[in-house]
Amino acid sequence: MSTDPNADVLQRLFEVIESRRVADPDSSYTAKLLAGGPKKIAKKIGEESAEVVIAALSEGKDAVTLESADLLYHLLVMWSATGVRPEDVYAEL
């Protein structure tokens, strides 16, 4: 087990996302995305991935970092919506 507190950040984020499945979409952005289903989430992933590309080409490290975090968040929301678990992806890697 790693002693780095950031080592399991994706797992912790996924658990928070999973907990939002029962939240009110009017009070939780994550619940709103999940209620919209994979089509809505896919649109956001497309937008966020384009923002990562733009940041990488013209905005520098800080922007790439910020946009990458947004992309990872939306990707984990998609995993939750489609029944994919982080360990499924890790096993594939």
Image: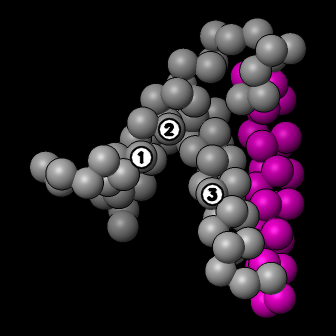
Residue at 41% across / 46% down in the picture?
Answer: 9
Question: Dividing the image into 4 quarters, which one contains the C terminus?
Answer: bottom left
Asked if the residue at tag 3 contacts the one at tag 1, i.e. Cβ–Cβ closer than 8 Å, the answer is: no
Single out the residue that lies furthest toward the bottom: 57
Secondary structure mostly taken by the magenta-highlighted segment of the chain: helix
> CA gap, disc 1 to disc 3?
11 Å
Circle 2 — which element?
Answer: helix
Q: Amino acid at mark 1?
A: Val
Residue at 49% across / 36% down in the picture?
Answer: 14
Residue 66 relative to residue 89: left or right: right
> CA gap, disc 2 to disc 1?
6 Å
Single out the residue that lies furthest toward the left: 1
The answer to if 12 sits in the magenta stretch is no
Q: Position of residue 3 (x, y in %)?
A: 18, 51
Per the image, the residue denoted by label 1 is: 9
Choose between 83 and 90: the one closer to the eye.
90
Per the image, the residue denoted by label 2 is: 13
> CA gap, disc 3 to disc 2?
11 Å
- Chain part drawn in magenta: 31-58
Choose between 29 and 77: the one closer to the eye.
29
Circle 3 — which element?
Answer: helix
Does 38 sit above or below residue 54?
above
Q: Amino acid at mark 3?
A: Ala
First in sequence: mark 1 vs mark 3: 1
Per the image, the residue denoted by label 3 is: 69
Q: Amino acid at mark 2?
A: Leu
| Residue 86 visible in this rendered orientation of the protein | no
**Category of crowding for the residue at label 1, using alpha-carbon neighbours closer than 10 angstroms: few (below 14), some (14–19), many (at least 20):** few
Residue 86 relative to residue 24: left or right: left
